[in-house]
Image (spheres, rainbow, N blue to C red):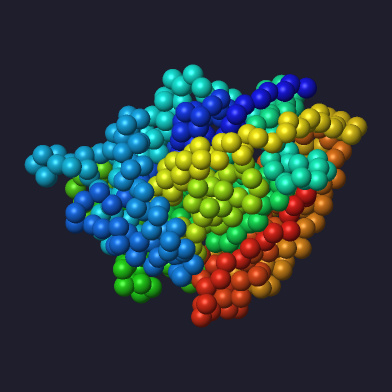
Amino acid sequence: MESQEFDYLVIGSGIAGLLSALHLSRLGRVAILTKREAFESNTNYAQGGIACVMTDEDSIERHVADTLDAGAGLCDERIVRQILTEGPASIEELIQTGIRFSVRSEGDGGGYDLGREGGHTKRRVLHAGDLTGREIQVSLLRAVSANPHITLIEHCMVIDLITTSWLGLDDENRCVGAYVLMRATGKIATMRAPVIVLATGGGGKTYLYTSNPDVATADGVALAWRAGCPIRNMEFIQFHPTCLFHPKAKSFLISEAIRGEGALLVNAAGEPFMHRYDERGALAPRDITARAIDNEMKSTGQACVYLDIRHKTSAFVHTRFPNISRTCKRFGIDIAHDLIPVVPAAHYFCGGVMAGVDGQTVIPGFYVVGEAACTGLHGANRLASNSLLEGAVCARLMARTVAQKTASLFSGKRISLPPWQFHGAVPSDEEIVVEHNWNEVRQCMWDYVGIVRTDRRLDRAARRIRNIRQEIREYYHDYLVTGDVLELRNIAAVAELIIRSAQARKESRGLHYTLDYPGSGAVAKDTVLDDGAGEKI
């Protein structure tokens, strides 16, 4: 079995992972592990942009107020204020890596071309056309590839973190490494590092319909849960209101920025309907907008609703949204002249591994940054385009904390890591079981743990997911691990965490809406699950 050793192990290659690696490379040798190609991440598909106060017409206080309002009483105001205040410095760091944000022409006053999205009271969203995430991903990967202190390892998947508790040692529980499946060879490597940073993103693929790419299978939350980290607020799954509805389109997001530029949400007759649900109309926060669309579809029997930006000139629409325009055109839709059919889809996890603003968890030396973490920024509903900012800021703060703690983090005794145990497992001849369970988990979550919930739906989902997880346990022990099995194992585990968290919240708040408890409680409380230590399945 292959064994490798680094000073820092970063799991994930989106904005949080790549920036974490770049910052940590100043302190020692870093390895980035990513389960497919390095560019394949949620960051790469982010269209709208990154929210940050950039002009005197805006203010940190206003951005804080918008974030708190969207978060429905569950944001940690101290964390919100810290991340948003640190934002401009992180934006400057991104610019220094070569990222080029869109600017206005001199005739329009020059400066950055700031967009506006749902829930924002000011234009503060930096963007690079409608391919902001791709611009960030390409620039950061270029910086990583030029850095001699960073080793990028693609097509590998972490099976489990190795902790001293799991090894049966009596000292303080800490991470000492990870077992990693090398997907090209099927071999399992041991990766040793005194500091491990989890930046694996979210898990939209837990649901049948999602805007996320195929890699978004909630691996990080499942890994941290099995290692013993508390998981917070997993019931808050953000459904993006507007994914393209077309039989041949797969997970294509129609950016919220298009509504920021004046697009209306309309029914099949072309009639706007959002004003009946919120005075902000099409610029209401995502939780309100997604529920409104869901209700509109159910009450009218329509398969979708539509975005209408036909009142803008063709030149403006195609220039401002070139990628959306090109993609829709492939499906026979001219966004400047046609209605754009859209439906909600699972998009973002507001909950995750309980972590500080610097990524610190309850396990010394183990940090979680980005979407996999729950820092307190997003509360019960994320304000649009705050996520990329969180990834950038928290990666920088994590590296600062690690630098301050270097002596203690590297002072532990060297522990012998046992080889991976196969326990008689054999190659599988029943791959259909994996595919069947994968589809059943995602269908179950979509049907019973979606935009609108009830106690009965959640109970039904809990029973089904428990049964599926038992089948996965048996399969996992009997057969050699594969990437598909590991992803199935992770989405099923996280599905159960989402259901348990939703069952525990006896109110409607933010992204969690239940017909049995339609009102919000007087006091906003977090949902924390902390009984996963040592669970290896």
Kindly identify the residue that appears in the image at 85 percent across and 32 percent down: 422
Residue 53 screen position, x and y as percent = 28, 52
In which quarter of the view is residue 130 placed? top left
In the image, 126: left or right of 143?
Answer: left
Count of all numbered marks drawn on residues in the image: 0
Residue 471 in sight in this render: yes
Kindly identify the residue that appears in the image at 46 percent across and 44 percent down: 397
Residues 232 and 441: in front is: 232
In the image, 297: left or right of 482?
Answer: left
Residue 181 in sight in this render: no
- Image quarter where the N terminus lies is top right
Residue 446 screen position, x and y as percent = 61, 58
Residue 141 screen position, x and y as percent = 45, 27
Judge whether 231 appears above or below 109 on screen: below
Judge whether 414 appears above or below 379 on screen: above
In the image, 165: left or right of 58?
Answer: right
In the image, 7: left or right of 147?
Answer: right
Kindly identify the residue that appears in the image at 50 percent across and 47 percent down: 358
Residue 492 screen position, x and y as percent = 70, 51
Kindly identify the residue that appears in the image at 58 percent across and 32 percent down: 8
Residues 277 and 490: in front is: 490
Residues 148 and 497: in front is: 148
Residue most extreme to the left: 107
